[in-house]
Image (tube, helix red, strand yellow):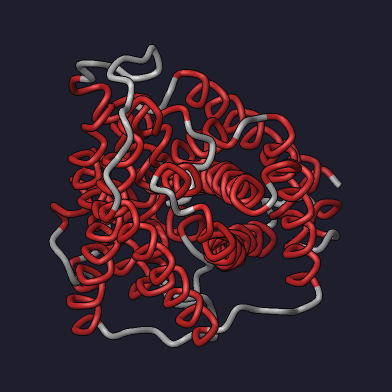
């Protein structure tokens, strides 16, 4: 939410708002699939293990790489957004410092509790609603109507590209549908209510914030903005509220980064348990391994490209998890198989609709990662 609106507006202009609905439907199908798979394999560490159990080791390795690439891109984008909103003069240094601090805390055993997550959500939503109120209370300045960064008629490709980037805003649902080991699991009856409520709540909040930014900045300025929330407040004569926005951005980034790194660590745990992660790699703290690729992405790519890579990798990951959910036995299902089929199709469409540079980076990373996992497995067997 801190960075996704700008690249979405760059490819779809004002049509990024309808694209949010497509992203939400995809997320809903993916949430249903992960919930069913968690019921079938309650002790499995996430989508990598689900795919391995249902489709075999090679699809599982690709799934693991897609998930780790997606987590690295999203973590880099979040850290970059933290720098852009809190320390804009030293964005990269602040982003790297935040990643290092959270990785160190997690490696030391510090975890983000459910109460802390709830408190963070209250703070972040309150700050976002304040930004929305200011943006709708003040008349917007004159905005340029034309910009090479914004497509006048985005068409299907533009809307799909925007949905691809915005999809990652919805993917925190696994905290509910597939909790980590030791966390409370919800029964199917509760999930039938909780999952749609969570997705719809995020959708409404995204639409409201996106409409506020679009009103205050216009599609051209929004597409070019490195920190849309900050620029919208300044445009609405709300510069005095920038410290409040900084607090909200910091809380959002820290909370989301904890969740993203925990998700990456979960996949690394699955890789070590099956022997797919080479022993030399497994000897490092898994939280450090989860954060290291994100640090490289922060240095190598701008936040918008990092987010697009994260979105592309995440969409590929859910493509595989939906594919594995399709072959679950009927008694393991809470939702019909059609939801997994729809989720599979939409996930692939979103992944292939990512910007060309992000798609190429993601595919290269998937090929290299899968090859390294296979090589490590061969060496381990030979040793």
Front in this rendered view, residue 300 or 323: 300
Does residue 66 appear in this view? yes
Q: Residue 214: x and y, percent?
A: 29, 39
Q: Is residue 348 visible to the viewer in this orientation of the structure?
A: no
Q: In this image, 41 relative to 205: left or right? A: right
Residue 109 located left or right of residue 331: right
**Which residue shows up at 53% across the image and 59% down it?**
240
Of all residues shown, which one is farthest toward the top? 148
Q: Residue at image x 59%, y 28%?
A: 367
Q: Specify whether 317 is left or right of 197.
A: right
Give the total number of marks visible in the rendering: 0
348 up-or-down from 329: above or below:
above
Q: Nearer the viewer, residue 57 or 358?
A: 358
* Between 356 and 255, the one nearer to me in the picture: 255
Residue 311 appears at what percent x and percent y? 45, 40
Q: Residue at point 20% right, 16% down? A: 153
Picture coordinates of residue 242, whole percent (x, y):
55, 57
Can you say whether 313 is above or below 151 in the image?
A: below
Q: Position of residue 30 (x, y in %)?
A: 30, 55
Q: Quadrant of residue 260?
A: bottom right
Give 86 or 46, whichever is nearer the viewer: 86
């Amino acid at each position: 939410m801190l960075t996704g609106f700008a690249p979405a507006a760059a490819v779809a202009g004002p049509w990024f708002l309808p694209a949010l609905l497509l992203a939400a439907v995809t997320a809903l199908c993916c949430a249903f699939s992960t919930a069913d798979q968690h019921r079938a394999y309650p002790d499995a560490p996430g989508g990598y293990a689900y795919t391995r159990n249902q489709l075999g080791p090679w699809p599982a390795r690709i799934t693991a790489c897609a998930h780790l690439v997606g987590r690295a891109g999203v973590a880099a984008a979040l850290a970059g957004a933290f720098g852009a909103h809190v320390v804009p003069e030293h964005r990269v240094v602040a982003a790297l410092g935040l990643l290092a601090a959270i990785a160190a805390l997690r490696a030391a055993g510090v975890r983000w509790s459910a109460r802390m997550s709830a408190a963070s959500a209250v703070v972040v939503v309150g700050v976002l609603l304040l930004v929305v109120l200011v943006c709708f209370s003040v008349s917007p300045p004159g905005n340029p109507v034309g910009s090479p960064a914004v497509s006048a008629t985005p068409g299907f490709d533009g809307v799909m590209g925007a949905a691809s980037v915005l999809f990652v805003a919805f993917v925190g649902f696994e905290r509910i549908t597939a909790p980590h080991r030791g966390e409370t699991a919800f029964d199917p009856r509760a999930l039938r209510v909780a999952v749609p409520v969570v997705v719809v709540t995020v959708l409404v909040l995204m639409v409201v914030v996106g409409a506020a930014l679009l009103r205050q900045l216009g599609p051209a300025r929004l597409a070019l903005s490195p920190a849309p929330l900050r620029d919208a407040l300044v445009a609405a004569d709300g510069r005095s509220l920038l410290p409040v926005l900084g607090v909200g951005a910091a809380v959002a980034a820290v909370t989301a980064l904890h969740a993203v790194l925990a998700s990456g660590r979960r996949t690394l745990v699955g890789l070590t348990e099956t022997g797919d992660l080479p022993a030399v790699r497994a000897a490092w703290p898994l939280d450090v391994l989860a954060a290291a690729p994100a640090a490289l992405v922060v240095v190598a790519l701008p936040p918008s490209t990092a987010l697009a890579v994260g979105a592309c990798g995440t969409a590929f990951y859910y493509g595989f998890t939906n594919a594995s959910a399709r072959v679950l036995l009927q008694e393991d299902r809470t939702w019909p198989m059609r939801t997994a089929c729809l989720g599979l199709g939409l996930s692939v469409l979103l992944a292939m609709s990512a910007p060309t540079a992000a798609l190429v980076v993601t595919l290269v990373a998937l090929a290299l990662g899968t090859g390294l996992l296979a090589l490590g497995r061969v060496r381990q067997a030979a040793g």
